[in-house]
Amino acid sequence: MKRLQSSYHQMGLENSKGLTLVEFMVSVLILGLVLAVLFSVFTTTNRMYWRTSERSYLQMNSRAAIEVMAQEIRSAGCDPSGVGLGGILMADSDSIRIQADLNGDGAIQTNEPSEDVLYFFDSANQTLVRDPGTGPQIIVDNVTNVTFSYFDWANNSISMFPLPADSIAQVRSIGVVITTEMQRGGQVNYATRVGLRNL
């Protein structure tokens, strides 16, 4: 017994009290606050990451669609064999139909690359659709609006929709705006203006 008591004296444990309940509760409270702050930072960062990723995805899709549209719209009216293509067959605020004799054979083909293409906004399904004559193909989804704007050689807006034939003949450039909506709210707009080199 003496040996046990002397070892307590050597280690200095005879006055050791440990944690009181109050000290333990304060420690738990501080730990809880630290964890709450860390969780808040994590969720905020995670939300920002997904929002940025979604915005980037929508911008990438819109940009790709506009690049394809711009290329096809720019070629509208290409008629190397002189068969009298109109170029723009139909022009409205949310749709456009264009023709171009890309291979120069004097005939309009509908297999890809199509020489007769319709672009339109499907508001019921919130999509931008491309129809090359073989059936509609969705090229962008989550679309809330698509706007086509038409301008003459003096850069004046032509806005009587759908454009009558005499107004279509005056079109020299076309503006395209695609508006997409993110799942967590907010919109992404992508716009371009295309000059018609063959009209």
Image (cartoon, helix red, strand yellow):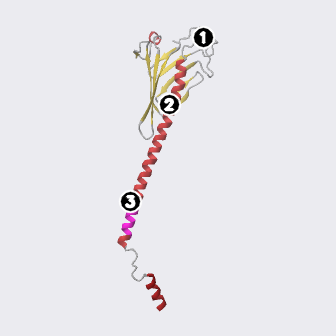
Seen as rendered, the residue at the extreme left is 22
State the residue position of label 1: 80
State the residue position of label 2: 62
* Location of residue 154 with respect to 176 vertically, above or below: above
At a point 49% along the width and 37% down the height, the residue shown is 56
Numbered badge on residue 148: none
* Location of residue 50 with respect to 65 vertically, above or below: below
Q: Judging from the image, what secondary structure is the residue with disc 1 in?
A: loop
Seen as rendered, the residue at the extreme front is 10
Asked if residue 187 can be seen in this view, the reply is: yes
- Measure how far apart labels 1 and 3 are at the Cα level: 74 Å
Q: Nearer the viewer, mark 3 or mark 2?
A: 3
Asked if residue 1 can be seen in this view, the reply is: no
State the residue position of label 3: 33
* Location of residue 51 with respect to 121 vertically, above or below: below
**Is 14 displayed left or right of 135 in the figure?**
left
First to last magenta residue range: 24-32
Taking depth in this image into account, of 45 and 168 the one nearest to the observer is: 45
Contact between marks 1 and 2 (CB within 8 A): the answer is no
